[in-house]
Amino acid sequence: MTATISQRLGLACTIAFTLLAGAADAALTHGQSAPPAPGTFVWVGDHRLHVHCMGQGSPTVIFDSGLGGTSLDWSLIQPKVAEHTRACTYDRAGYGWSDRGPSPRHSRRIVAELEQLLGYSSIGGPYVLVGHSFGGLNVQLFAKRNPERVAGLVLVDSSHERQFEAFDEAGLPSVAPRGNSFMLRNYNNVPSNMPSAVRPLAQKFAYASDTVVSIHSELANMRRSAQQLAADAPLPDIPMAVVIHDPSPYLASPRSATMALLWKRLQTDLAKQTSHSRLIVSQSSDHYVQFADPATVTEAIVDVLGQARGIDVACQVAAPEPFTC
């Protein structure tokens, strides 16, 4: 096997992120040498967020990417989901086409900005939220804070609110620092299985100075984000699918097996957070399940979407102010 479990789990366990020597100093700012944004921009405070929607229908599916990821991370999934309903990807502040936002970058701030993005745009609820890795923390917190607006969740190899304590107890390495000092290791953060059509642009965004600053802040506040999720209310009892990578290839090595089994235990716990949940194990062992096994992720979203359409959500229209009907 060419990669260890810690290399494959990316953000969720130990991040595979590229900061080549000197890349930050020579980095581009967002918007330079990039094609025009495919979507639109919405002002959120003093900065703009980029959002790109396809399709028609309700509930609207909203995607959030992992650490360092952009709306391009859903390039294989969004068009397929858009055949069934309205599907919207967005770039968190500092990523993709979005402007850099205020610091610190933790889940509570990120969720507040997403609330404003949806409230000030024409993207009305209810929503089915899809989150990969760190994005899973964000969408869970959004659902806890806006239960009347969320009709379903799909977590794709998602971070868990208790994962850092679990890693510490097991003596495993954790990406989230205990203090303000840490190192970003020299791995390639653009997934190797990302489609060639979007990979060059994703790599360009990865080296942008705004991306470097945003990742640094999100990473420094990772434990804080998990604590924010743990301190909030329970998840609303809504349909949920938890899609995870296949851990079996990692069981041959004792150390990798420890992490793989812990990760599966955490994911199994996520799938118990609502009475309408199920755990789906992908045939791929890659943390970026949305690229390695897009059919399974798409099927999970469409299944939750179908269940969500049977739920009576009182407030279903776009409003002029955030989350008022």
Image (tube, grey):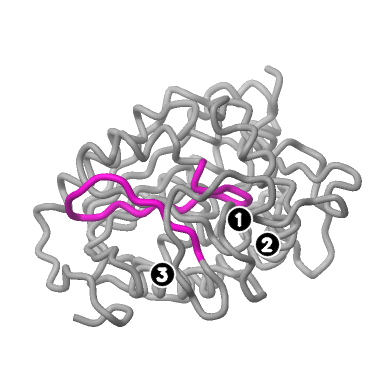
173 or 177: nearer the viewer = 177
Labels 1 and 2 touching (C-beta < 8 A):
yes
Whether residue 14 is visible here, answered yes or no, is no
Q: Kindly identify which residue carries mark 1.
A: 95
Compared with 270, 216 (above or below) is below
* 135 to the left or right of 254: left
Cα–Cα span, label 3 and label 1: 15 Å
Q: Between disc 2 and disc 3, whose residue precedes? A: 3
Give the residue type at disc 3.
Answer: Leu
**Residue that appears at 69% across and 60% down:** 219
Compared with 38, 232 (above or below) is below
Say which quadrant the N terminus sits in: top right
**Residue that appears at 46% across and 63% down:** 41
Q: Quadrant of residue 98?
A: bottom right
Which percent across, then down, holds residue 106? 59, 69
Whether residue 17 is visible here, answered yes or no, is yes
Cα–Cα span, label 2 and label 3: 18 Å
Say which quadrant the C terminus sits in: bottom left
- Crowd rating for badge 2 (residues with CA inside 10 Å; few <14, some 14–19, many 20+): many
Task: Examine the structure image and report whether residue 184 is included in the region drawn in magenta.
Answer: no
Q: Between disc 3 and disc 1, whose residue precedes? A: 1
The magenta stretch is: 49-72
**Residue that appears at 68% across and 62% down:** 214
Task: Find residue 117 and name its label.
Answer: 3
Q: Kindly identify which residue carries mark 2.
A: 214
Give the residue type at disc 2.
Answer: Ser
